């Protein structure tokens, strides 16, 4: 930790990139403590070369960067995270639904009004809007005095949503508030065919409503973003993204589309992975 305190921010960022996946919590925290960190993280996030497997940092630098932004907690850090969610949603892939609710919620109650404004943007991907709804739900449970306000906002938003899948995402969030007064609104939406029943069915409503808080979907996002850099988490990612049997190759016997899953098994789109190797 001491050596990091002696390093300039630019060198800390260089160190983060060079370590690829293996960035320790101490380095992430030191970067987050620097006043000029956001501008350096922006440089990583807005440069396409960092998003490619095989490039600088093996595509981990942007992922680490978005997990450092919530540790900074400034307005600029939030805006950068929201911009990246919008502009790099394809590159982020499953990180949108699996991590960003935690990251957004970590900005706390000061982010509520900005998130309300952001989620109203109908040009955003529905998975981004769903993740923001989850983040608002997390904030509501972390700050009980904000719960009624956020519940009312999501209820009104749900009423005006036209996309059945997004409406289904909102149902899950609304049910977690355990407010009996919301049930008639939700059942009417099912009766009108406004809900994607492949995501949640009408028969699931009572079951989800009665789930204990620790089993509600939002609960898994109630954690500190610094956990991303824990040894346990890093080892999990190593097993997932670097299995021993994984082989990188440019040549394949069949044509692979730019937006097809990469044959290397990374989970990324081909254009963001081995296509550039």
Image (cartoon, grey):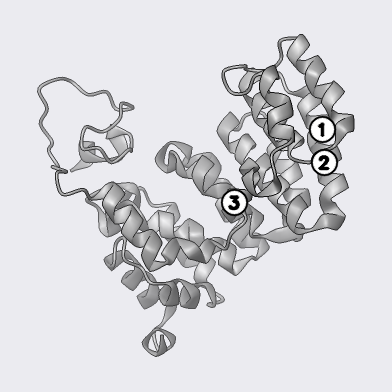
Given residues 186 and 273, the one toward you in this image is: 186
Quickly name the residue at label 3. 221
Q: Percent x, y for residue 266? A: 28, 41
Image disc number at residue 155: 1
Q: Residue at x 65, y 30 (%)?
A: 169
Category of crowding for the residue at label 2, using alpha-carbon neighbours closer than 10 angstroms: few (below 14), some (14–19), many (at least 20): many
Q: Percent x, y for residue 103? A: 58, 55
Q: Residue at x 81, y 44 (%)?
A: 150
Given residues 134 and 50, the one toward you in this image is: 134
Find out whether the residues at labels 2 and 1 contact each other: C-beta distance under 8 Å: yes
Q: Percent x, y for residue 86? A: 55, 40
Category of crowding for the residue at label 3, using alpha-carbon neighbours closer than 10 angstroms: few (below 14), some (14–19), many (at least 20): many
Relative height, residue 121 to residue 103 (above, below): above
Q: Which badge, 1 or 3, comes first in the chain's sequence?
A: 1
Quadrant of the rendered structure where residue 93 is? top left
Q: Quadrant of the C terminus?
A: top left
Q: Which badge, 3 or 2, comes first in the chain's sequence?
A: 2
Given residues 179 and 106, the one toward you in this image is: 179
| Residue 269 visible to the viewer | yes
Element assignment for label 1: helix
Residue at the far top: name it: 192
Quickly name the residue at label 2. 151
Quadrant of the rendered structure where residue 134 is? top right
183 sits left or right of 209 in the view? right
């Amino acid at each position: 930790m001491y050596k990091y305190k002696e390093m300039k921010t630019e060198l800390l960022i260089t160190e983060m990139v060079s370590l690829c996946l293996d960035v320790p919590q101490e380095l992430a925290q030191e970067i987050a403590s620097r006043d000029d960190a956001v501008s350096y993280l922006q440089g990583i996030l807005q440069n396409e070369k960092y998003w490619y497997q095989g490039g600088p940092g093996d595509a981990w630098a942007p992922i680490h960067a978005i997990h450092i932004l919530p540790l900074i907690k400034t307005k600029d850090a939030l805006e950068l995270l929201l911009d990246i969610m919008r502009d790099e949603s394809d590159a982020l892939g499953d990180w949108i639904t699996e991590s960003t609710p935690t990251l957004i919620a970590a900005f706390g109650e000061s982010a509520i009004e900005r998130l309300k404004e952001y989620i109203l943007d109908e040009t955003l991907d529905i998975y981004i809007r769903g993740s923001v709804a989850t983040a608002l739900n997390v904030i509501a449970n972390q700050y009980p005095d904000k719960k009624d306000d956020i519940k009312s906002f999501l209820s009104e938003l749900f009423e005006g949503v036209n996309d059945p899948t997004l409406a289904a995402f909102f149902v899950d969030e609304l049910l977690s508030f355990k407010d009996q007064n919301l049930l008639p609104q939700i059942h009417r939406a099912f009766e009108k065919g406004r809900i994607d029943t492949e995501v949640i069915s009408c028969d699931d409503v009572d079951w989800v409503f009665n789930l204990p808080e620790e089993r509600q979907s939002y609960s898994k996002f109630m954690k500190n973003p610094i956990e991303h850099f824990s040894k346990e988490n890093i080892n999990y990612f190593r097993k997932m993204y670097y299995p021993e049997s994984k082989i990188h190759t440019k040549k394949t016997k069949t044509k692979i589309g730019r937006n097809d899953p990469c044959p290397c098994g990374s989970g990324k789109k081909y254009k963001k992975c081995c296509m550039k190797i």
